[in-house]
Image: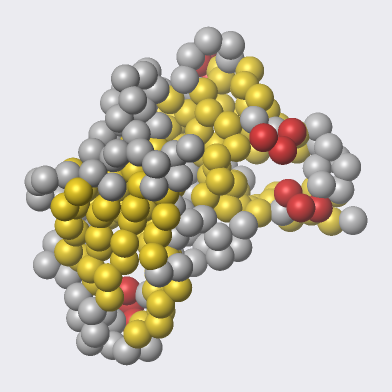
Amino acid sequence: AQSVTQPDIHITVSEGASLELRCNYSYGATPYLFWYVQSPGQGLQLLLKYFSGDTLVQGIKGFEAEFKRSQSSFNLRKPSVHWSDAAEYFCAVGNFSGNTPLVFGKGTRLSVIA
Amino acid sequence: GAVVSQHPSRVICKSGTSVKIECRSLDFQATTMFWYRQFPKQSLMLMATSNEGSKATYEQGVEKDKFLINHASLTLSTLTVTSAHPEDSSFYICSAVTGLISYNEQFFGPGTRLTVL
């Protein structure tokens, strides 16, 4: 079965500290991986995606993620968190065929303290 | 490019009424659109897959007679919540697939907040 696990429901970090959000997936085909961010009451914003090639992908807002096939992981990182990064983060997996929906993890809520 | 809009962004209705939510791909044609529902502090759950010109495919547990989906054109899909009840209050998000040859990618609308009183 296809699934995405985000082990951390809620993470709190200090502003300026580094961040890593974990994501593990289970997928029968070649996975296409995504990270989205959602602010309260808002829609989803794509941070980055991995389709193929370099396993370290750069996204918007200073985020990056690394695909590790051996660990079935796609962890999201940021070297220095800003207060505006406080939001809900979702990892998702899909396949090349766009007529299949994405499978989302349950999300990780990020709080940033001064 | 690849912008998806939803209308309305927010709607409040009385119990028993029907509500229509539109999802439009503004600058591309979308043969497939997906409808997701998100309850407070939860993840997105797929409700149905909408393909242009054919009947929607509903996920298990989603009542197709309650959540009517019409995908009449390559740029518009509508979700109608019929006889809405308070438990239908949720955040509804659509996504559209560009159908490009490579790297099919879904683009999400901004969502519609439905509150049923």
| Position of residue A89 measured from the top left corner of the image (x, y, whole percent) | 59, 46
Residue at image coords 17%, 57%: B70
Work out which residue is located at the far top of the displayed protein and give it: A53
Numbered label tally = 0
Task: From the viewer's side, name the closer residue of A71 and A99.
Answer: A99
Task: From the viewer's side, name the closer residue of B71 and A112.
Answer: B71
Question: Is the N terminus of chain A in the top left, top right, bottom left or bottom right quadrant?
Answer: top left
Q: Is residue B9 above or below residue B50?
A: below
Q: Is residue B88 above or below residue A31?
A: below
Q: Is residue A9 left or right of residue B8?
A: right
Q: Quadrant of residue A65?
A: top right
Residue at image coords 27%, 70%: B20
Question: Is the C terminus of chain A in the top left, top right, bottom left or bottom right quadrant?
Answer: bottom right
Task: From the viewer's side, name the closer residue of A87 and B8.
Answer: B8
| Position of residue A16 measured from the top left corner of the image (x, y, whole percent) | 88, 42
Residue at image coords 18%, 43%: B51
Q: Is residue A45 above or below residue B17?
A: above
Task: From the viewer's side, name the closer residue of B103 and B91.
Answer: B103
